[in-house]
Amino acid sequence: MKSWFVTTLGDPEEALEIREIKRPVPEKGEVVVRVKAFALNFFDILQCQGKYQEKPALPFTPGAEVAGVVEEVGEGGSLSVGQRVLAVPLLPHGGFTEAVVVKEEDVFPIPEELSYQEAAAMFITYHTAYYALQTKAQLKPSEKLLVHAGSGGVGSAAIQIGKAIGAKVIATAGSAEKLEMCRQLGADVVINYREEDFSQKVKKETTGHGADVIFDPVGGNVFHSSRKCIAFDGRLLLIGFAGGNIPEAPMNHALIKNYSLVGVHFGYFRRLFPEKVKAAHDELMELYKAKKIKPLIYHNYSFEEVPFALNQLGSRETWGKLVVGTKGVNR
């Protein structure tokens, strides 16, 4: 079978190489998943470059999100051969491959209605948004939710989950095309942050109340402008720092406006509370079947196009999730 390997550190087209390897065999507590589709993430690029916090020995196969069919079950397993699943493989045996061994605890059944491409695009973004809005922010119906980078993978998930909860959703993006996508995802108000002062627009759209919850995966100046339009008793969710600048917050401002700065690290939560993640997965699957959420996919690429697709992702001109299909993928 074929797998992509990082054989040297560098940009994706330099670092990655396809190799033929033996099909994996599961041990106790593991399953082999025949991969139908896998998703790309920005940290895959960092891993190719050797700039990510995890630095496995070369060569290794990247890829953290796959969807496919259970092909073989190790001793004592509870999953069934032929079962449709999404899975979260671990380095150095990642998901850029045709078949992967995964711990059974990292495998999640999916319904027939969910395509493999969509399933591959769901885990990190939707679980992060769900954990942030439901668990950390405790977002309530009719509250005002501001989502930054609304056309991105995690931002698009946050818009949909916010609407499913019943919030009024305001989304920011940087182009007319991306704003239209935010509208299609359900955003009630969209703001081009390149052309407008979003903090003033949020105040206007909420008649001075401000945003009860702000979902910020950008950081930098976006964080500081967000502080200007957060409501009294608001919750500012720190999802990440895609803007590249980690801001410092003046604590006196948080005290005066009585808002909370809330860190959101889904990966850590997942390690500590795997049973809660399983329950959240079940709830997300129900939301999908009810047509309240649907992954936003920029493009489906072929297996051979992985380096090209990662370079497109690195350009930051894409939106939603980028997904790769393997041979024989359907739906």
Image (cartoon, rainbow, N blue to C red):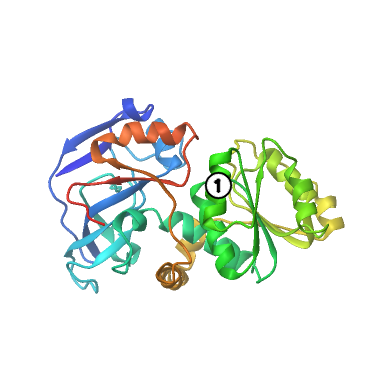
With respect to residue 16, does 43 lie above or below?
Answer: below
The residue that mark 1 highlights is: 180
Residue appearing at x 58%, y 61% in the figure: 132
Percent position (x, y) of residue 261?
Answer: 71, 56
User: If the image is split into quadrants, where does the C terminus sit?
Assistant: bottom left
With respect to residue 14, does 86 lie above or below?
Answer: below
Q: Is residue 115 left or right of residue 22?
A: right
Task: Pick whichever, 147 or 187, lies toward us.
Answer: 187
Could you tell me if residue 256 is visible in this image? yes
Q: Secondary structure at mark 1?
A: helix
Task: Pick whichever, 116 or 137, lies toward us.
Answer: 116
Percent position (x, y) of residue 193?
Answer: 67, 40
With respect to residue 45, does 38 lie above or below?
Answer: below
Q: Quadrant of residue 198?
A: top right
- How many circles with numbers are drawn on the protein? 1
Q: Quadrant of residue 112?
A: bottom left
Residue appearing at x 78%, y 57% in the figure: 210
Percent position (x, y) of residue 279?
Answer: 44, 73
Residue appearing at x 58%, y 68% in the figure: 134
Task: Pick whichever, 108 or 176, lies toward us.
Answer: 176
- Mark 1, Cα crowd under 10 Å, few <14 / some 14-19 / many 20+, is some
Q: Quadrant of residue 89?
A: bottom left
Task: Pick whichever, 192 or 19, lies toward us.
Answer: 192
Could you tell me if residue 249 is visible in this image? no
The type of residue carrying mark 1 is: Glu
Percent position (x, y) of residue 277?
Answer: 45, 68
User: If the image is split into quadrants, where does the N terminus sit?
Assistant: top left
